[in-house]
Image (cartoon, grey):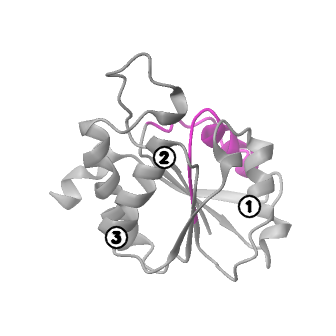
Amino acid sequence: MLLLMRHAKSSWADPAQPDYARPLNERGRQAAPLMGRFLRRHYPHLELIISSPAERARQTAQLAHSAAQFNCALTYDARIYEASALCLLAVVNEITEPASIVLLVGHNPGMEEFVRLLTAAPPERMPTAAVACIKFELATWRAVTVQTGRLSQLSRPKEIMSQFA
């Protein structure tokens, strides 16, 4: 199972700040742990998190990981920043961990494109901090390719907020 999470809402308080260095804003700092608690409830056996190292994605991954109290590894892959769907596919194909549930934390438009590439699902909007769950009937991450997955769930912070109030 592959979970795809778009980073939480970032701050534009400093327009001169480089894109890569933009941190989360207050809404993002609230949404990331909320989605972490959601992940813990629905995917308690998450085994690996791979995040873009861009500040907003890194903060999202760390806050979600902490709120969920996961014991899994949290790693960073520079290729996820500004990645195309095909680049994200390469990242997934190279997962060597014996993990059956993996979370990728990244950016749009790559995340939305990746969902469509893997599932051929109709376009779904992934607002900030949304999590898409894609299921596969494959033995290895190397076998993941175009249209081999099924979008089983797309969860947005606004939709789940009442569950964790």
- Against 154, residue 109 (above or below) is above
Q: Residue farthest to the top?
A: 15
Image spot of residue 160 (x, y percent):
29, 52
Dot 2 or dot 3: first in sequence order is 2
Image spot of residue 30 (x, y percent):
25, 47
Indicate which disc residue 49 carries.
Answer: none
Q: Which residue is mark 2?
A: 57
Dot 3 or dot 1: first in sequence order is 3
Who is closer to the viewer here, 27 or 12? Answer: 12
Image spot of residue 72 (x, y percent):
50, 78
Q: Secondary structure at mark 3?
A: helix
Dot 1 or dot 2: first in sequence order is 2
Residues rendered magenta in the picture:
103-127
Who is closer to the viewer here, 127 or 105? Answer: 105
Instruction: Give me the residue at 51% from left, 25% from top.
Output: 18
Q: Secondary structure at mark 2?
A: helix
Q: Is residue 119 left or right of residue 160?
A: right
Q: Are marks 3 and 1 in contact (CB under 8 Å)?
A: no
Instruction: Give me the residue at 45% from left, 73% from top.
Output: 43
Instruction: Give me the residue at 58% from left, 35% from top.
Output: 108
Q: Which residue is mark 1?
A: 92
- Against 29, residue 125 (above or below) is above
User: Splitting the image into 4 quarters, where does residue 92 fall?
Assistant: bottom right
Q: Amino acid at mark 1?
A: Val
Q: Amino acid at mark 2?
A: Ala
Q: Quadrant of the C terminus?
A: bottom left
Cα–Cα span, label 3 and label 1? 22 Å
Indicate which disc residue 68 carries.
Answer: 3
- Against 71, residue 128 (above or below) is above
